[in-house]
Amino acid sequence: MFSIDVFASMFIVVLGLLVLIVVVFYIRDVTQTKHAIRRNYPVIGRFRYFFERQGEFFRQYFFALDREEMPFNRAERSWVYRAAKDVDRTAAFGSTQSLEVTGTVMFMNCAFPTLDEEALDPSNVTLGPYCKTPYTTNSLFNVSGMSFGALSKPAVRALSKGAKLAGCWMNTGEGGLSPYHLEGGADLVFQIGTAKYGARDEHGNLSTEKLKEIAAHEQVKMFELKMSQGAKPGKGGMLPGRKVNAEIAKIRGIPEGQDSISPNGHPEIKNPADILDMIATVRNATGKPTGFKAVIGDYTWLETLFAEINHRGIESAPDFITIDSADGGTGAAPQPLMDSVGLPLRESLPLVVNMLEKHGLRDRVKIIASGKLIVPSKVAWALALGADFVVSARGHMFALGCIQAMQCNKDTCPTGITTHNERLQRGLNVADKAQRVANYNKYIHYGAGLIAHSCGVTSARELARKHVRIVQESGLSEPLDKIYENYK
């Protein structure tokens, strides 16, 4: 009887609390003026916002088809997860990808494919032949720019260690060089953003002394001048103040706890000639290959840039150009820019390659492609279009365990990758995730090689436009070399 009395009392207390909560919600809803639904339907109207938020997750796991989800569909993510875990990556019965959709990429297999004993590793490519310290690598696939700050400490450590295991490079992103980038021993590309984080003086200007200090690290192989980014062309990097802790503030050289918003562009760069001047400044100070990253929109300035290079001399050229697609990723960006500005890689990549060939600069300037290239077929496609290298940020985030929760800007990432909440970071085991990064990188190379061998060439770097056809609106396909023959 005593137990019944206790439970009855508890039930009455809980019921009373629920009634009180409902009354409080009712009063608040009918008196507030910001939300019409809550004012007209007090208490019940609150469920709309709850279901709206939950719908995002239900669609991902229950309702979206394997090939329709954005920005990355379940089929793509599933392949990355399996590759990273080094488990079976084969499929059965038939492909779920339609071959009739306009824009579908199809590689043309050769009647006499390359045999295993004839296959070769990707050839070495040298960047910065006129530099004091050129950089030579055979890695096709590398880690794109992700800042410490946008990423958590364990995520940066895992990527650094994984890149070392894979033998690829890792881009620091615009947030400066942290000890965690250096920890793994991987080759590094130091990115110089518009705010010059990590390489700025007390006035926010580019410091050649800081550049020399960074270049003194043997691991730092190249420098990348970030002009613009696919997800936010015309807008600088954005790191919410809640993610700017004391350590990040020190590395970046900014106040703790305040929003870190980079300028829309480099104040020193107003025309193509200024780009070459800035590249020369960085390259002379560091002695290492220097290039720039940009999402291509208006491209008339490239004609001026390439003409200026030929006027100054071929040594003045950027050692590489990283072309970011308009559908590239970011930790935080205004949606109008993310949705509607810039050219996708399928247009910008062949355009830049053709322009370099037109000006006789194709061999001098290496091309790095970036933007949603997370599976072997898309990497092989970019190489066939003319890229020398491919870089990916979100692909490597998936290898770390990212579930596409799309909370990168809220410091609530459930996998610990983009949050500085130590409780959430505990789930990210650095040693395990580093191996997954290496596995993923290995199987990207392996998969791109499979496609190349099927096309009858010995390695993925030999893929060309003639090996690819694209489905047109008629339902029939056209070869890439014909589509982009006069594309300038």
Image (tube, grey):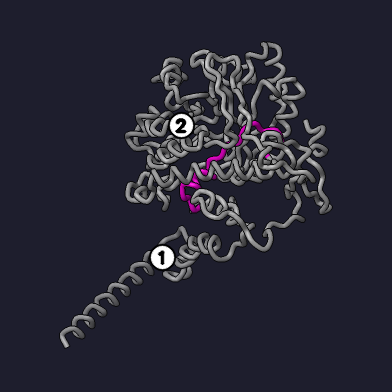
Which percent across, then down, holds residue 362?
71, 24
Q: Residues within 10 Å of mark 2 (few under 14, many from 20)?
A: many
Residue 302 appears in the rendering: yes
Q: Which mark is residue 243?
A: none
Mark 1 = which residue? Answer: 29
Q: Residues within 10 Å of mark 1 (few under 14, many from 20)?
A: many
Q: Residue furthest bottom?
A: 1
Q: Residue 326 falls in which quadrant of the image? A: top right
Q: Residue furthest front?
A: 117
Q: Which residues are magenta?
A: 382-404
Please report whichever mark, 1 or 2, sits nearer to the chain's N-terminal start: 1
Mark 2 = which residue? Answer: 186
Which percent across, then down, holds residue 400?
46, 47
Query: Would you say residue 456 sits in the magenta stretch?
Result: no
Three-letter amino acid code of the residue under disc 1: Asp
On screen, residue 45 versus residue 380, left or right, reads left
Three-letter amino acid code of the residue under disc 2: Ala
Q: Helix or strand or loop: what does disc 2 sit on?
A: loop
Q: Residue at x 56, y 40 (%)?
A: 392
Q: Residue at x 42, y 31 (%)?
A: 185
| Quarter of the figure with the C terminus | top right
Residue 343 appears in the rendering: no
